[in-house]
Image: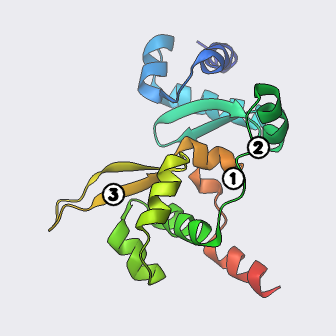
Amino acid sequence: MDLQEAKLILEGILFVADEPVPVAQLAEILQVKRSVVRKAVRALADEYRERGLRVQSEGERVQMVTAPETAEYVERFLGLEFSGKLSVPALETLAILAYQQPITRPEIEAIRGVNCQGVLWNLVARGLIETLGRRETVGRPIVYGTTFEFLQYFGLGNLEELPELGEIEQADEG
């Protein structure tokens, strides 16, 4: 199977999938190696970069989503209320989590210096973060990570598109 055929089939599958699809499952369906699927996903993501849809990948999962710049119109079409902005504490917590994940609440609180339980519940309720399991340490704290909704909310194709911390500091100074 050549790359063009793999992209065509992946595009159809991702279009109808209602949740992220594991790369292993896509490879099995296409009867190709995972590396072929990853290459086709990257090519599709590049092609969709300037369109109303995006191809997102996180780890070993892939999903087709609407472009973030269309969110207001898509929500209006679907009859949904605009989800609103995140609070400063939520953004701070989310930034720490995005760059340090997987991370526990006590680790986030050690960085922020304040209790984050309510903020974490809000971020989980909004679908921006999820529980990934528990650490095998005293108290077995919950481990958190970002979701596909996080990527979509911030218009990212994957976590590698997060700006480098040095870029953020320079923007703050300017």
Rendered position, 160 above or below 171: above
| Mark 2 residue crowding within 10 angstroms, few (<14) / some (14–19) / many (20+) | some
Q: Label 1, secondary structure: give it.
A: loop
Chain-order first, disc 3 or disc 1: 3
Q: Are dots 1 and 2 in contact, CB under 8 Å?
A: yes
Please name the residue that numbered disc 2 is placed on: 68
The spot of residue 40 in percent (x, y) is 62, 27
Q: Is residue 72 left or right of residue 138?
A: right
Whole-Å distance between the Cαs marked 3 and 2?
Answer: 27 Å
Q: Label 3, secondary structure: give it.
A: strand
Amino acid found under the numbered disc labelled 3: Val
Please name the residue that numbered disc 1 is placed on: 154
Amino acid found under the numbered disc labelled 1: Phe
Q: Is residue 149 left or right of residue 145?
A: right
Q: Tell me if residue 157 can be seen.
A: no
Pick out the residue farthest to the bottom.
173
Point 75% across, 82% down: residue: 172
Chain-order first, disc 1 or disc 2: 2
Q: Nearer the viewer, residue 97 or 50?
A: 97
The spot of residue 96 in percent (x, y) is 51, 70
